[in-house]
Image (spheres, helix red, strand yellow):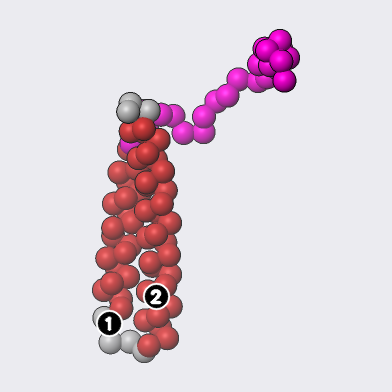
Amino acid sequence: MSYTDLKKEFKVAETFEPVFQLNSQGRYALFSLVIAVLTISMALVSAYSKKGFVIRLATFAALSGVGSMFAGIGVVFLANSLGVYV
């Protein structure tokens, strides 16, 4: 692709608007990482409960899955908010 074609495509392309603003991503990272720590802690507590094995396994799997999801989201938001300044 030549430079003139690239410049034409740049001029006709619509402007990019982010879904999450950069200045609020640090706050989202903090909230999601706190939720991740809480749900993973709840998963560890549920693993040592007195209920049956299947119930403990299902509860642990669900809570650790949700906690891992929030941890991943928090890391992405944290990398986006801090990676801009590095």
Residue sitting nearer the eye, 1 or 82: 1
Q: Residue 80 location in percent, x, y?
A: 40, 35
User: In the displayed structure, does residue 65 sit left or right of residue 3?
Assistant: left
Q: Is residue 21 magenta?
A: yes
Disc number at residue 59?
A: 2
Disc number at residue 49?
A: 1
Q: Residue 72 location in percent, x, y?
A: 41, 52
Q: Is residue 2 magenta?
A: yes
Magenta segment range? 1-26
Q: Which quadrant holds residue 23?
A: top left
Q: Earlier in the sequence, mark 2 or mark 1?
A: 1
Residue sitting nearer the eye, 83 or 69: 83
The three-letter code of the residue at mark 1 reads Ser
Residue ranking furthest to the bottom: 52
Alpha carbon of mark 2 to alpha carbon of mark 1: how far?
A: 10 Å
Locate the N terminus by quadrant: top right
Mark 2 crowd level (few <14, some 14–19, many ≥20, 10 Å Cα): some
Residue ranking furthest to the front: 2
Q: Residue 44 location in percent, x, y?
A: 28, 72
